[in-house]
Structures are given as structure tokens and as C-alpha cells.
Image (cartoon, rainbow, N blue to C red):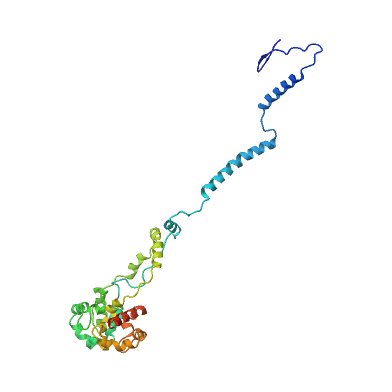
Amino acid sequence: MPESTGHGIIDDPPAPAPGAIPNVHAAAEIMTQDLQEDHQHSSPIKTPKQLVIVVVLAFVVPITLIVLLSQLVTGGSKGAHEDAGLVQQRIQPYGTVVLADASAPKGNLTGEQVYAQVCKTCHEAGLAGAHKLGDKAAWAKVIAQGEKTTLEHAIKGIRAMPPKGGNPDLTEAEVHRGVVFMASKAGANWKEPAAPTTVAAAAPAAVATPTAAASAAPITAAAANVPASKPDGKKIYDTVCMVCHAAGIAGAPKFGDKAQWAPRIKTGIDALYTASLKGKGAMPPKGGNTALPDADVKAAVDYMVSAAK
């Protein structure tokens, strides 16, 4: 009777004839086919060790691939193509502190400072008819004419005194303070104009902000590379030396007078520098403005010498 299998209904193999030799090759072929079918439905993992290896590889291989990909993307030369300005902006400090200039702000000089920097040149020694500081007899006529008239003379100039004492950078308020300072030494009761408080003016300067920091480094770096400018000899002459040298006061050689300058030029430029820095005769050291740097004084000497050659 025929048998039913999962592959369909097959007939029973014919019974071998009595005395016949079994077909060994046909039997072997049938067994091989059965083994192949069993192999197709079996799992490749046979042992627990193989299972552990498969699980480990399932984690290690993806992680290794991710790491290699990240190295490929980020492993290039960092910053090789970045703009130098952006790099500088990124590495600079978060904030900076900007200190106020040590010198007094323009317009804030006190009467005593104005006297020391400008008026002292003539008023200390009484050069060219200038009233000596503290000489009450000499200042009595000046005080008698009134504060307004005296201030007008100081601002516009009178006789040998140039406008603003030879320093056009002074504000009228600063000139006023200088006049009041000198007059008070001779007994006047004039009131000196109030100067803005330096604390209030300087406070905003010491502010640190991220915005200021973003631009401070490039600007500071650029300023550091700029060489110091050469002192302006003409400007120094106009503000200090002109008081005496313009009119030849107190034996000072007049500006541009070759005959008066010739013997002095013969002594050599170094001798002229020394006399200007340390003073000579009626000329005080540095023309009376001791705050001037040596380089500025030398620049003024060079300017006057060149005009006399």
C-alpha cells in the first residue's frame, strides 16, 4: 500500500527479487538526500561557546565601525583652514580691563598744574616783565583791574606774553584756574572754576565687557606693532620755547636769527641738548616745563637749530 510523507505520496519501492543483490548505490543516494535536508533546517550554532562569540561580535563590530568612522571625519588637521581672525577671537580672554590714562584728561588741569607746566617759565623768575609769583606789589595792579580783564589778557595775550601762555592746548577754564592760582598767592580772593572730578571721569574707563574683549586683542596687537611717533619739535616750540625765543627775551636767541644762533651751533648739538635739559643762564631746565620728556626737548632744539642754519 502506498505511504504518505511530507513530500507527497510515494509508492513503496519494489521488493527485490529473491536472490537479487541489493542496489547499494541507490540506498546511499537516498541517505545523502535525507542528510542534506536535515542540514538545511539545522542552526549553525552548535555549542554555547559559539553563541558567546556571536553575541560579542554583534556588539564589537558595530562599535568598531562607529569609532573608525568618527576618526575619519574628525581626524584631519584641526584649524588648518580656519581664518586667523576667527582663531584669535576664539582664544582671547573673556574680558579685559582698560585702565584710564595716567595723565590728566583735557580740561581737568588744576590752577597749580597749569602754573607748573606753563606759567612757571616766566612768572617764577619774572622774565620779560612777568609778575613774579607771590610778589604782592607787582600783582596789586593786576588784581585791581579785575578778574575778567586779567583773564582776557591771559587768554588773548598781552605784550610779551603769548595767548594762553604759549600753550594753545589749554582750555579757557584751565587758563582761568592758572590765573586764579597766581593771583591768590598775591592776596586775591578770586574763585577758581571747579574741575570735573577725575574719579567720575576715570571710572567708566575701567570696565571689562565681552564685547570689548572681542576687539581689544586685535587692536592691542596692531598698536604694539606701530613704532613710536617722532616728537613734533615745532609743537614743543610753540607751546614752551616760543615764550622767550620768539622775542629774544632774557638773552634767549631769537628764532631764525642766524647771527645769534651761529656761536651756539658751533658748540655742537650735544652741548645745546645739555643746556636745554639742565638749564643755562636765565633759561630754566626744559624751558620751565619739567614734565617734558628729554626726546621732546631735543626735538624742539633740532627745530630751532634747523631754522637758524
Which residue, as the protein is rendered here, is positioned at the far right? 19
Q: Quadrant of the C terminus?
A: bottom left
The quadrant holding residue 89 is bottom left
At a point 53% along the width and 47% down the height, the residue shown is: 72
Q: Is residue 51 above or below residue 101?
A: above
Would residue 265 be visible to someone looking at this image? yes
Residue 127 percent coordinates (x, y): 26, 87
The quadrant holding residue 176 is bottom left
Q: Quadrant of the N terminus?
A: top right
Of 33 and 147, the residue lying toward us: 33
Residue 161 percent coordinates (x, y): 22, 82
At a point 68% along the width and 36% down the height, the residue shown is: 50
Residue 129 percent coordinates (x, y): 23, 87
Residue 228 percent coordinates (x, y): 37, 72
Would residue 97 be visible to someone looking at this image? no
Q: Is residue 139 above or below residue 57?
A: below
Q: Is residue 262 left or right of residue 228?
A: left
Q: Is residue 101 left or right of residue 23?
A: left
Q: Is residue 185 above or below residue 72?
A: below
